[in-house]
Amino acid sequence: MQRHLKLAQDILKGKVAKLRSPEWERVEKEHLEKEPACQWCGGTVRLQVHHVTPFHLAPALELDDFNLITLCEGGGYLNCHFIHGHNGDWKSFNDQVREECRDHACSPDRKILEEVRKSDPLLYDFLIKARKDKKSG
């Protein structure tokens, strides 16, 4: 039943929809246990297991761990899943997302924000909100 609800949600969002494997929930859970933070920003809330090569283009890779990466939807800089996984367009995909996340992990911005998040979560939330407001305003 859950798989069918996800299919309906995808259709309503305008995504190309295909019925997921009955193994998807298990694979998704196992992936999040191995990779429990957004690979772009380090966030740990609203995590998504993103397919590097989209499921609708390569259904055979749906359960392939090498094709999966953890990205968040609002837990860090913004919506890393949408911005970095889909290049800001749900109909697009970024086949370099893994490499870009690896490069970004070494950037001074990310390191500073990670330290702030660990030492002062309220300041971190304030900085992220200010960053979102600046970008949207």
Image (cartoon, rainbow, N blue to C red):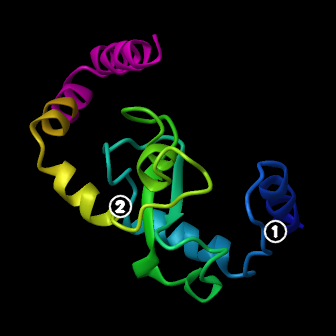
Tell me which label, 2 or 1, sits earlier in the chain. 1
Judged left or right of residue 38, residue 101 is left
Q: Nearer the viewer, residue 51 or 30?
A: 51
Q: Is residue 108 magenta?
A: no
Q: Is residue 71 above or below residue 112?
A: below
Q: Which residue position holds label 2?
A: 97
Q: Is residue 48 above or below residue 80?
A: below
Outermost residue to the bottom: 60
What is the tally of numbered marks visible in this picture? 2
Task: Give the Cα distance between marks 2 and 1.
Answer: 26 Å
Q: Give the mark toward the camera: 2 or 1.
A: 2
Q: Which residues are magenta?
A: 114-137
Three-letter code for the amino acid on which mark 2 is drawn = Val
Q: Which residue position holds label 1?
A: 3
The structure residue drawn at horizontal position 77% and vertical position 52%, both measured from the top left corner, is 14
The structure residue drawn at horizontal position 28% and vertical position 14%, both measured from the top left corner, is 123
Q: Position of residue 64 (x, y in %)?
A: 50, 84
Secondary structure, mark 1, is helix
Q: Position of residue 77 (x, y in %)?
A: 36, 32
Q: Which mark is residue 52?
A: none
Q: Is residue 120 magenta?
A: yes
Q: Quadrant of the N terminus?
A: bottom right
Q: Nearer the viewer, residue 97 or 110?
A: 97
Q: Secondary structure of the magenta portion, mostly?
A: helix
Residue 101 lies in quadrant? bottom left
